[in-house]
Amino acid sequence: MTVIDISASVMQFLLAFVVVAPLLGAVAALLPAPPGLKGKNPDQAVLRHGVTVTGAVLIATIVLAVGFDHDQPATMQATTDISWIPALDVRIHLGIDGISLPLLLLTALLTFLCALYSYFKLPAGPSPKAFVALVLVLESGTLATFAVLDLLLFFLAFEMVLIPMYFLIARWGGGQRQAAAWKFILYTLLGSVVMLLGILLIGLKSGTFDMVALATDNGRGLTTSVQVIAVLAIGLGLAVKTPMWPLHSWLPDAHTAAPTVGSVLLAGVLLKMGTYGFVRILLPIAPDGMRTFAPYLAAFAVVGIVYGSLACLALARTGAKGDLKRLIAYSSVGHMGFVLLGIATMTPTGVNGALFANIAHGLITGLLFFLVGAIKDRYGTADLDTLAGATGAALYGRAPRLGALLAFAAIASLGLPGLAGFWGEMLTLFGAYSPAEGLSRPAFRTFMAIGAFGTLLTAAYMLIVVRRVCMGEHPPHSRLSPDDRAPQAADGPQPTGAAGARPAATTQRLADIQTYEAAAWTPLAALTVLAGLWPAVLLGLTDPAVQKLLAGGKS
């Protein structure tokens, strides 16, 4: 069933346009703006160009989704297959199914919202032209990663995003941005070198780099030892990008230093490239190798869940001087642990849960980083002790809409039923309860119990953040008994000196949600509710494709 019947050739064009248009837009962004488009401010012209290009890509992606045959989500659609390097049998092979389509939509949406937000709130840094060009190159590489069906093209697209993200952190980031950018690029490049060796091993041993042919073969053309080596090599590269504990240490530094839109794109789409690679490449192409490493992957995943939550609790406690952006970054380590646990179960339930959690994390954590950036802009800091201790009534009293939206995003992140964060975690835990044949049930049920404990820790630190940032902390002199406070209340006006400064701060208003902020954040909040109340929209796409993937290309 298609919502609108679109011909195959138009679908092919749309997918190619989605991948190539941002790259062409990046080149155009660096050219001088035509005189009629400069407007009053030449810098605004290039920012407007970024909004236009990302908006066109989003519209094309939506049309692609509308024309997608939802009765056959397991079938590759909008396919293009052209020989590119005959000597290596490398082909420009593009296509989408129920696994990749939601990720294309998420990437196009988040990039457009980031471009729209930057039009009104450009981060401090060098030329806006370079900023827009880098964001567009980043979008092109990410979309290509989810659309290509050739292993070498996948690797090139996977690497394409590293350089623009490096410069976004290093040139438009905050404190310690150079060190954070170097850590990001070194970790990911070292992981990518090992991943390339694994990809070449698969291609040389099987005689093809075509991901569809390899998935259909389902590892039958590869010996178990080759599969084990390939999973180890490719898995390391993917695990760095995910990131999996203990390869995660670049992520908190990168998020803390990155500009707001950089953090949104890093959490919302770049982390998904690693988990997508596990599902698209390792599960169908090297199933025996995955079965060997699945218990270890699950163990690292649940350690990441608990570690990320404990790190967040440590940052959230009073007096820790924890940075709110850093806390949200550590929460991503925990949330991506659930995705990896679902993949490690090698069951349709677990993998569907992982894919659902991927999308939910992109929506919710993207919204959280937008909100934290707005709070930092208003207060001049993201330090939790400052936000909680110096503001009295905090966000509920000073910017109530902003406070309410932050509380909503935090509750969604902790997995409240009825919101997007719930279904992915629940399906992942169900998958761990009954893992694939050949995997140890006692071990995976232990992992399930540890993961369930992680959900409690997640709820604990998120509620602490809401209490401290949204409600604030009472100043010490307010912790008096009613009898002690009564005479003071009857004495008339409060003093205006230092002793009376804190009560005055509680009534000082901040700028609440602005129109451009509402435009950038409302779609994420609305989709978080929609995915929570109607999960069948997403699961109806992913489940048939996952069933086919795990069955070796057989529906």
Image (tube, rainbow, N blue to C red):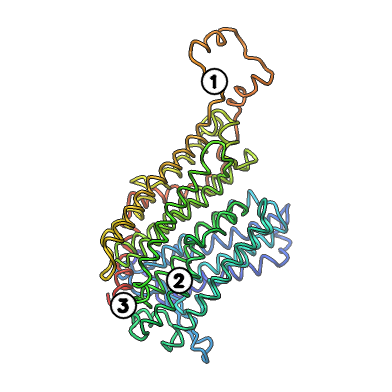
Q: Residue at x 35, y 50 (%)?
A: 422
The C terminus sits in image quarter = bottom left
Q: Which mark is residue 235?
A: 2
Along the horizontal axis of the image, is 470 left or right of 6?
A: right
Please, what secondary structure does the residue beneath circle 2 have? helix
Q: Quadrant of residue 444?
A: bottom left
Q: Amino acid at mark 3?
A: Gly
Mark closer to the chain start, 1 or 3: 1
148 or 330, which lies in front? 330
Q: CA distance from mark 1 to mark 2?
A: 54 Å
Please, what secondary structure does the residue beneath circle 1 have? helix
User: Which x, y percent locates residue 78?
Assistant: 42, 74
Q: Amino acid at mark 2?
A: Gly
Residue beneath disc 1: 478
Q: Quadrant of residue 447?
A: bottom left
Q: Amino acid at mark 1?
A: Ser
User: Which x, y percent locates residue 308?
Assistant: 47, 52
16 or 509, which lies in front? 509
Tell me the crowding category of disc 2: few under 14, some 14 to 19, or many 20 or more residues within 10 angstroms, Cα based.
Answer: many
The N terminus sits in image quarter = bottom left
In front: label 1 or label 3: 1
Mark closer to the chain start, 1 or 2: 2
